[in-house]
Image (spheres, rainbow, N blue to C red):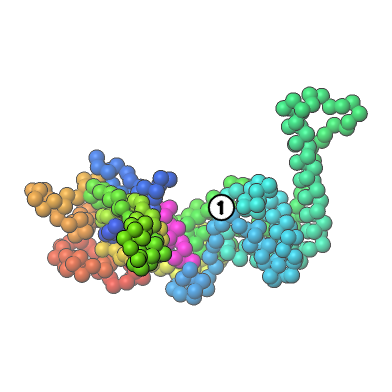
């Protein structure tokens, strides 16, 4: 097992980022409103870690699948409820199965392995698992290959399984009718209704499904982890990445933006109206409403446990050398995604995904370090206030680096501090700051060892 004295440095890589966003809505609550928290006695806008982690994970997966970056061509995962449908598509496209039989067989095999599915009476969810399952993206292809290879035995078992399910449903219906007053006691001439026992899936088939769904060499599963309670003997993964919620370094201010959407046909009629009555009929907007937008400078933090990443990959079957090489590549892509990825909600109407961070601070240590405390007192941007710090972006950079320099003097394990900025004003500011203990770099990859 790789030790925490790996050639890539200390066990933990801590990342801290400041970014300024204007009129965006990257994450919403159940009512469509921005999410917020109260911190330091004031309300702050919040972007949840779940939204950021998914954006980072998908960014990493898409680059790998496109042959880009350090993880080009490596295996990645897919989180979905559609594994039965994915398996069925592989059966039809690669093995020539008829579609209806393919779906029926794939669902039966995966369900018998331990995953629960939606109500069979509802077409929209009948073939979807009740939980999202994060598994290697080729899991469906692998399950389909086994089913086709063992077609005779699997088909025979599937028919037996479906027949037993039907009997179980009938049995449940009769018992329900008696319980609800349809018939208090069974007829003396009627055989008692027995519970139908479902046949166990063949051992080889169950093993094939578990192997296909196991994390294996999917890099993003090793990074972000997964939890699957439904199948006790399918391995869970404690992720190597910790992520915090992002929050504004100042008090939150929300804007409810009124919008009016034009009806093109109505406007064309108005433009070509022959008299004022025609114009009056088409005077109103096609649709109106409100959308909430947020603006602010956000602080967010993540940490990579290098030792955990290597252990996850070795537990999935890699040798120590393979895990080391994959981990170095995964670290480079994780840092790139942390800097570049952004949640895509409202991306077309706010251009939020084009944002670049004002500052990224990275350093190594023997434990994680979260610098949220640097912003417990909200930044006051009011230039008329004697305690005002000016614009939040530069003020937050000063606070963060001052906080880091102070902590670094008291924690000797902190080392290899680096900063990256995409803001020319911040770059000039960095040149004036003394004793930050950080070296400026020009790209995300340079933030890693």
Residue at the location (16% across, 65% down)? Answer: 429
Question: x, y percentage for residue 322?
Answer: 52, 69
Residue at the location (80% across, 53% down)? Answer: 159
Quadrant of the image occupied by residue 262: bottom left
Question: x, y percentage for residue 430?
Answer: 18, 65
> Of residues 202 and 174, which is closer to you in this image?
174
Residue at the location (82% across, 62% down)? Answer: 152
Question: x, y percentage for residue 406?
Answer: 21, 53
Q: Which residues are magenta?
A: 49-61
> Of residues 213 and 87, which is closer to you in this image?
87
Q: Which residue is mark 1?
A: 132
Residue 57 magenta: yes
Question: x, y percentage for residue 285?
Answer: 35, 57
Name the residue at the right extreme.
Answer: 189
Left or right of residue 327: residue 120: right
Name the residue at the bottom extreme.
Answer: 67
Left or right of residue 354: residue 424: left
Quarter of the image with the C terminus in it: bottom left
Prevailing secondary structure class for the magenta stretch in the rendered image: helix
**Mark 1 surroundings within 10 Å by alpha-carbon count, few (fewer than 14), some (14 through 19), many (20 or more):** some
Q: Is there any visible trace of residue 206 in the rendered image?
A: no
Q: Is there any visible trace of residue 326 in the rendered image?
A: yes
Q: Secondary structure at mark 1?
A: loop
Name the residue at the top extreme.
Answer: 184
Residue at the location (70% across, 59% down)? Answer: 103
> Of residues 371 and 117, which is closer to you in this image?
117
Residue 80 magenta: no
Q: Total marks drawn?
A: 1
């Amino acid at each position: 097992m790789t030790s925490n004295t790996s050639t890539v440095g200390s066990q933990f890589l801590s990342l801290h980022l400041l970014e300024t966003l204007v009129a965006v809505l990257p994450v919403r609550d159940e009512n469509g409103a921005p999410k917020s928290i109260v911190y330091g006695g004031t309300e702050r806008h919040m972007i949840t870690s779940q939204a950021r982690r998914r954006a980072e994970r998908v960014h990493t997966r898409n680059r790998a699948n496109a042959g880009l970056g350090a993880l080009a061509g490596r295996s990645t995962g897919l989180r979905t409820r559609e594994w039965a449908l994915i398996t069925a598509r592989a059966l039809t496209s690669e093995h020539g199965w008829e579609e209806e039989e393919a779906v029926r067989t794939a669902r039966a095999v995966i369900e018998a392995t331990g995953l629960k599915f939606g109500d069979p009476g509802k077409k929209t969810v009948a073939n979807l698992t009740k939980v999202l399952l994060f598994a290697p993206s080729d899991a469906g292809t692998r399950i389909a290959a086994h089913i086709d290879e063992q077609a005779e035995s699997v088909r025979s078992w599937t028919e037996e399984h479906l027949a037993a399910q039907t009997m179980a449903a009938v049995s449940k219906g009769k018992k329900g009718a008696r319980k609800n007053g349809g018939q208090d006691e069974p007829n003396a001439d009627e055989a008692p209704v027995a519970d139908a026992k479902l046949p166990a899936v063949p051992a080889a088939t169950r093993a094939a499904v578990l192997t296909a769904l196991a994390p294996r060499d999917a890099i993003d599963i090793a990074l972000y982890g997964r939890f699957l309670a439904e199948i006790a003997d399918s391995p869970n993964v404690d992720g190597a990445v910790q992520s915090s919620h992002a929050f504004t370094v100042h008090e939150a201010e929300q804007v409810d933006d009124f919008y009016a959407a034009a009806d093109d046909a109505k406007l064309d009629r108005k433009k070509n109206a022959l008299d004022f009555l025609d114009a009056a009929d088409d005077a109103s907007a096609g649709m109106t409403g409100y959308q909430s937008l947020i603006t602010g400078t956000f602080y967010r933090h993540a940490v990579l446990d290098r030792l955990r990443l290597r252990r996850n990959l070795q537990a999935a079957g890699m040798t120590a050398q393979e895990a080391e090489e994959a981990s170095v590549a995964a670290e480079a892509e994780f840092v790139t995604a942390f800097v570049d990825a952004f949640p895509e909600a409202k991306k077309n109407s706010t251009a939020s995904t084009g944002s670049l961070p004002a500052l990224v601070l990275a350093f190594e240590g023997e434990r994680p370090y979260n610098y949220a405390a640097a912003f417990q007192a909200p930044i006051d941007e009011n230039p008329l206030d004697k305690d005002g710090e000016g614009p939040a972006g530069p003020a937050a950079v000063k606070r963060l680096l001052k906080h880091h320099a102070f902590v670094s003097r008291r924690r000797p394990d902190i080392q290899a501090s680096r900063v990256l900025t995409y803001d020319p004003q911040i770059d000039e500011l960095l040149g004036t700051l003394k004793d930050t203990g950080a070296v400026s770099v020009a790209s995300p990859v340079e933030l890693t060892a």
